[in-house]
Amino acid sequence: MKRDEIAKHILNRLNQDKESLKQQYDDSKSKIGYFYIDNLLPSEIVNEINNQFPSQSKMSLKKSLRENKYVAAQMNNYDPILEEAIYAFQNPEVVNCIKYICSIDDLQPDEYLYAGGLSSMKKDQFLNPHLDNSHDKDRNSWRVLNLLFYVTPNWNDENGGNLELWPNGLKEKQTTIPSKFNRLIVMATHQSSWHSVSPVIVDSSRNCVSNYYFSDNPLQPDDKFHVTTFRGRPEQVIINQVLKIDSFLRMNIRKLFKKGIKENPHVYKKDN
């Protein structure tokens, strides 16, 4: 299955619900714009993507107070269908369709998968409330959309590992969007788009294929550069204070070193 074939399925499905998806995004974009669509691809394709997901031992573990998950971006290390699936979302017609749905004039997919690619979370793993890094790896373009495609069959809402949006801030109740099999979620990223992933509470893994889209302009006119910024959940008072200090220190380091002290390894390093 090649990326153009997968992209054709994605485009056909998006076009079926294009106007309702646009309305869904428009209704939410005053805070955190988002839409989601189910049954994106034929189920046999999604099952094959999930079946070929690398074992967590072949992925990188990111574990701290901020997050606990496995990630991978060096796609030529894995089964080809995974790379084909990821880059299907970068097909120009798919990008143009999402551009229409979200009313964003300028959208650019990221061939280097900076902070994108594959992610997997098992029991007790999580992602605390955070704002995504505002820019691409070279700090030339603004990160504006996050695309999350969930591929684990029979994943129940009660299993955890669900996307949480905090449109009214971290002191108000979050909006939970379950990470249902064959569901694509597209959400805006800007300096107010706090989001998280609830802890997985079952002895199983929730797998996700992700992409970011970038733009020459931020989604909000007052957006400013920021590193990935984490906070604690409302009940995590001490962790919240620690993560505030952590974000402050990392932000000041980036003021001195544009690309950080060391290069972020979470990119697809392609052969020239």
Image (cartoon, helix red, strand yellow):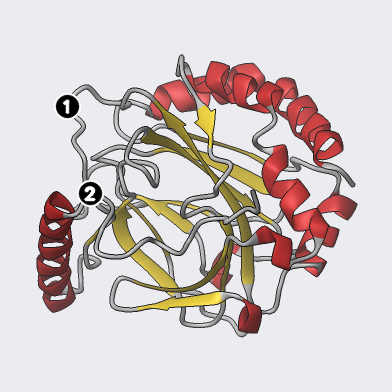
Q: Which residue is mark 2?
A: 258
Q: Element under label 2?
A: loop
Q: Give the image location of residue 256, x and y in percent.
A: 12, 54
The kind of residue on which mark 1 rests is Asp
The kind of residue on which mark 2 rests is Lys
Q: Residue at x 79, y 26 (%)?
A: 12
Q: Which mark is residue 178?
A: none
Q: Residue at x 51, y 69 (%)?
A: 160
Q: Give the image location of residue 71, x and y in percent.
A: 54, 68
Q: Element under label 1?
A: loop
Q: Which residue is mark 1?
A: 222
Residue 8 lies left or right of residue 75; in this view the side is right
> Counting other residues with Cα less than 10 Å from the Cα at mark 1, is it few (<14), some (14-19), or many (20 or more)?
few
Q: Give the image location of residue 189, x and y in percent.
A: 36, 39
Please tell me which residue lies in front, 167 or 9. 9
* Name of the residue lying farthest toward the front: 272
Give the CA separation, mark 1 to mark 2.
20 Å
Task: Kindly indicate whether the residue at mark 2 contacts the one at mark 1 (C-beta within 8 angstroms).
Answer: no
Q: Is residue 134 above or below residue 238?
A: above
Q: Residue at x 81, y 57 (%)?
A: 80
Q: Give the image location of residue 60, x and y in percent.
A: 53, 75
Q: Looking at the image, can residue 152 be seen?
A: no
